Image (cartoon, rainbow, N blue to C red):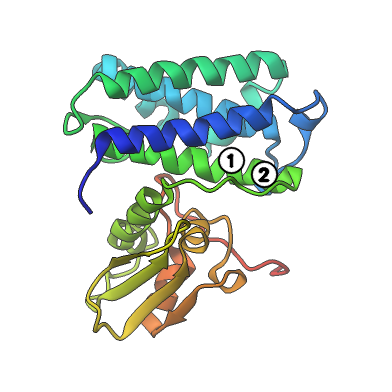
């Protein structure tokens, strides 16, 4: 997929703006509502985004200081996002919203003023500026989905689904390695229906293993917000099916989404 860096940043801003609009309508009690992420409230979802926006800014501006901070967090255990969420629960809703909007605005400006191929450190392997922006888009979309689910709202459509879907595709090998699996040699063809019409495709058309359906459904699966059997995806072949059981487009400890009702 060719890189449209300005378009990627517009998609990130679009997702951010829609989320902030909806957050601005919440009552103080809404911020404490439980989301599908176990133990996390709406407030926890936003402090998570704000913290990692600040972490990204630190990685851009002072890679050495970021590495020291990141290594310290990881050394304390891969559950550090849960501990960070607990740390910020006493903040008021207004403080949290201002933190997120200010940090995100600053991050968008930093992305726009830099080179998309510049490398920066992260909690896993280092990444390019463009990859970092894609990861922030994916994280924002995924945590916004948790919030919209908690509030019973539809997730506003975003052309940025293509970038998130692409991240889901290119993390095929990463997902298998993270879960201790060998990377399959058989290719998978992915054909996703774009929100505005048309189709986005990856992989050889003649592949025996295939995934097709709405782009939003695929993104819900690779961000582990839905199990693939709970979506409109059509999945053909054992490699495609086993991949979607463990697909993970985000860094961190290996995890899986179980179908609803699974003990």
Q: How crowded is mark 2: few (under 14 residues within 10 Å), some or many (20 or more)?
A: many
Q: In which quarter of the image is residue 188?
A: bottom left
Residue 73 lies left or right of residue 98; in this view the side is left
Residue most toward the front?
197
Q: Which mark is residue 62?
A: none
Q: Do the residues labelled 2 and 1 touch (CB within 8 Å)?
A: yes
Q: Residue 7, position in %: x, y? A: 32, 37
Disc 1 marks which residue? Answer: 144
Front position in the image: 199 or 151: 199
Q: Quadrant of residue 193?
A: bottom left
- Residue, x 48% and y 46% (percent of image)? 158
- Note whether residue 188 is visible: yes
Q: Residue 148 carries which label?
A: 2
Q: Residues within 10 Å of mark 1 (few under 14, many from 20)?
A: many
Tell me the element at label 1.
helix
Tell me the element at label 2.
helix
Residue 252 lies left or right of residue 124; in this view the side is right
Front position in the image: 89 or 28: 28
Q: Residue 234, relative to residue 49: is it above or below?
A: below
Image quadrant holding the N terminus, namely bottom left
- Note whether residue 83 is visible: no
């Amino acid at each position: 997929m060719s890189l449209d860096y300005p378009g990627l940043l517009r998609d990130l801003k679009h997702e951010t703006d829609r989320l902030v609009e909806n957050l601005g309508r919440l009552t103080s009690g809404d911020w404490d509502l439980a989301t599908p992420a176990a133990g996390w409230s709406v407030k926890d979802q936003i402090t998570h985004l704000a913290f990692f926006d600040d972490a990204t800014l630190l990685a851009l501006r002072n890679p050495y200081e970021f590495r020291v901070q990141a290594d310290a967090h990881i050394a304390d255990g891969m559950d550090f996002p849960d501990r960070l969420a607990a740390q910020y629960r006493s903040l008021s809703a207004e403080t949290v919203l201002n933190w997120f909007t200010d940090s995100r605005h600053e991050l968008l400006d930093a992305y726009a003023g830099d080179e998309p191929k510049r490398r920066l450190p992260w909690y896993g392997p280092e990444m390019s500026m463009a990859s970092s922006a894609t990861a922030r888009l994916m994280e924002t979309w995924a945590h916004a989905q948790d919030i919209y689910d908690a509030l019973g709202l539809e997730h506003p459509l975003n052309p940025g689904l293509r970038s998130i879907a692409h991240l889901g595709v290119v993390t095929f090998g990463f997902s298998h390695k993270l879960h201790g699996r060998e990377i399959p040699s058989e290719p998978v063809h992915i054909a996703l229906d774009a929100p505005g019409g048309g189709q986005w495709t990856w992989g050889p058309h003649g592949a025996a293993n295939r995934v097709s359906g709405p782009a939003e459904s695929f993104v819900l699966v690779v961000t582990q917000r839905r199990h693939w059997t709970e979506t409109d995806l059509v999945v053909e072949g054992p490699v495609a099916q086993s991949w979607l059981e463990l697909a993970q487009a985000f860094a961190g400890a290996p995890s899986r989404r179980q179908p609803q009702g699974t003990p």
